[in-house]
Image: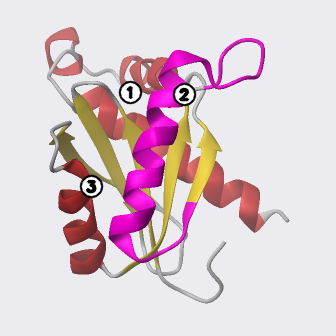
């Protein structure tokens, strides 16, 4: 974890879209920061956002398989993380993102969001990024 104040970025990596979230500089709350299409230029687009937002640490959600290993999707995310580390110039942490998409959908339901709104592309991806970043911040705050 990066010491001192500074904004953190959460990334929920998906095959089509990547959800982004940002913390405030004091790392108290998170906010959605949109989505990016998963294209060959993804790592460079994230690097640009890292610079613009003055991010000091990036947290990428890792989808672990039921046996605790990375699984096929986890291996894909691992390759993305390696590319990202060469492009962004700040530390990258891995965080267990199991069930964040399910939790994001449930948060929308609990909040009374209409089904049509919940189905908008990227909404779940962005919320999943927020949830994984919030979980990471809460975990590191309690250490």
Q: Secondary structure at mark 2?
A: helix
- In the rendering, at what x and y percent does residue 82 appear? 47, 52
* Residue 44 as seen in the image, left or right of residue 21: left
Q: Secondary structure at mark 1?
A: loop
Q: Residue at x 61, y 89 (%)?
A: 4
Q: State which quarter of the image contains the C terminus.
A: bottom right
Compared to residue 100, the image places residue 59 above or below, namely below
Compared to residue 2, the image places residue 74 above or below, namely above
- In the rendering, at what x and y percent does residue 29 appear? 48, 63
Q: Residue at x 57, y 21 (%)?
A: 99
- In the rendering, at what x and y percent does residue 72 appear? 52, 17
Residue highlighted by disc 1: 111
Q: Is residue 124 visible?
A: yes
In the displayed orientation, state which residue is furthest to the bottom.
4
* Residue 19 as seen in the image, left or right of residue 141: left
Numbered range of the magenta stretch: 64-92
Give me the disc on residue 27.
Answer: none
Residue highlighted by disc 3: 43
Q: Residue at x 72, y 23 (%)?
A: 69
Q: Specify which label sits upstream in the sequence, 3 or 2.
A: 3
Give me the disc on residue 74.
Answer: 2
Q: Are marks 3 and 2 in contact (CB under 8 Å)?
A: no
In this rendered view, identify the residue nearer to me: 89 or 100: 89
* Residue 37 as seen in the image, left or right of residue 80: left
Q: State which quarter of the image contains the N terminus.
A: bottom right
Q: Specify which label sits upstream in the sequence, 1 or 3.
A: 3
């Amino acid at each position: 974890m990066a010491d001192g104040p500074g904004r953190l970025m959460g990334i929920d990596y998906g095959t089509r879209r990547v959800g982004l979230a940002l913390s405030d500089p004091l790392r108290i709350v998170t906010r959605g920061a949109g989505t990016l299409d998963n294209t060959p230029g993804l790592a460079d687009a994230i690097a640009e956002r890292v610079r613009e937002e003055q991010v000091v640490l990036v947290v990428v959600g890792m989808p672990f398989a039921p046996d605790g290993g990375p699984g096929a999707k986890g291996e894909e995310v691992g390759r993305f993380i390696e590319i990202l580390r060469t492009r962004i110039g700040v530390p990258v942490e891995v965080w267990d993102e199991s069930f964040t998409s399910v939790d994001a959908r449930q948060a929308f339901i609990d909040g009374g969001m209409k089904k049509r709104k919940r189905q908008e592309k990227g909404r779940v991806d962005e919320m999943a990024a927020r949830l994984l970043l919030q979980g990471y911040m809460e975990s590191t705050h309690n250490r």
